[in-house]
Amino acid sequence: EAAEAAGAAMLHISTDYVFDGAGGAPYDEAAPTSPQNIYGASKLAGEQAVLAACRRAVVMRTSWVFGAHGQNFVKTMLRLGRERDSLGIVADQDGAPTAAARITIVRRHTPEQLAERAGIYHYCGSPYASWFEFAETIFAEAATQGVLAKIPAVKPLATADYPTPAKRLADSRLDCGKIRTVFGIGPCDWHSALSDLQPYL
């Protein structure tokens, strides 16, 4: 509301969890939303509130965010790699890891440009992967960089073998074609974001 009153643009970060994960193909911005847990429902409500309050808002949905700060999958894998000889990782959930440092790339555009291109966009990493494939890549990089004394064996698990309190999405791949067309921003290569794992330790 303050942004609207000031005539300012606003960038709001949202999530792949606004979808149901049963689409079978990457979700574009026009795909029907159907959150399957409270987190996804609250994020969808946030999107709707922002778009209703500010005509110059850009809502950017992203997924599987990782970075050197805070808790995330990369840091968890490296910690467990130090503690265990083997790990079971879910292999039947697909999405796209996204480096946190790249999410704010849209901020390089001026407020005027954002205001002119308000709406919903998808932005995530490339290529698509399962959590199992993501973990394998993390440990391959850890071995190459020598950041772990030993590399654990990684075994694929089915979602049914790893129940969680909140329902997880089987397929949360996002189609990033719109943001490439409108802003000229392509997906980030998440492999390259793992090229220096030292800050994650």
Image: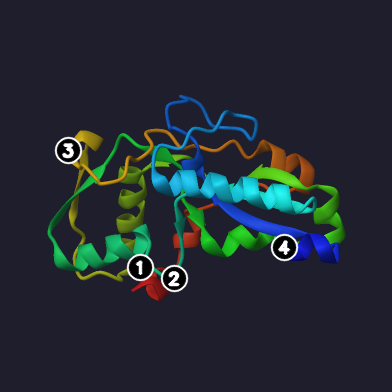
Q: Which residue is mark 1?
A: 145
Residue 52 on image: x %, y %: 71, 47
Residue 30 on image: x %, y %: 65, 30
- Neighbor class of circle 3 (other Cα within 10 Å; few <14, some 14-19, many 20+) is few
Label 1 SS: helix
| Res 1 visible | yes
Q: Which residue is mark 3?
A: 161
Q: Nearer the viewer, mark 3 or mark 1?
A: 3
**Left or right for 179, reference 62:** right
According to the image, what is the colour scheme of the structure? rainbow
Q: Nearer the viewer, mark 1 or mark 4?
A: 4
Residue type of the residue flagged with mark 3: Asp
Label 4 SS: helix
Residue 188 - label: none
Label 2 SS: loop
Q: Residue at x 64, y 35 (%)?
A: 29
Q: Nearer the viewer, mark 4 or mark 2?
A: 4
Q: Nearer the viewer, residue 72 or 197?
A: 72
Q: Residue at x 54, y 33 (%)?
A: 33
Q: Which residue is mark 4?
A: 107
Q: Which residue is mark 2?
A: 68
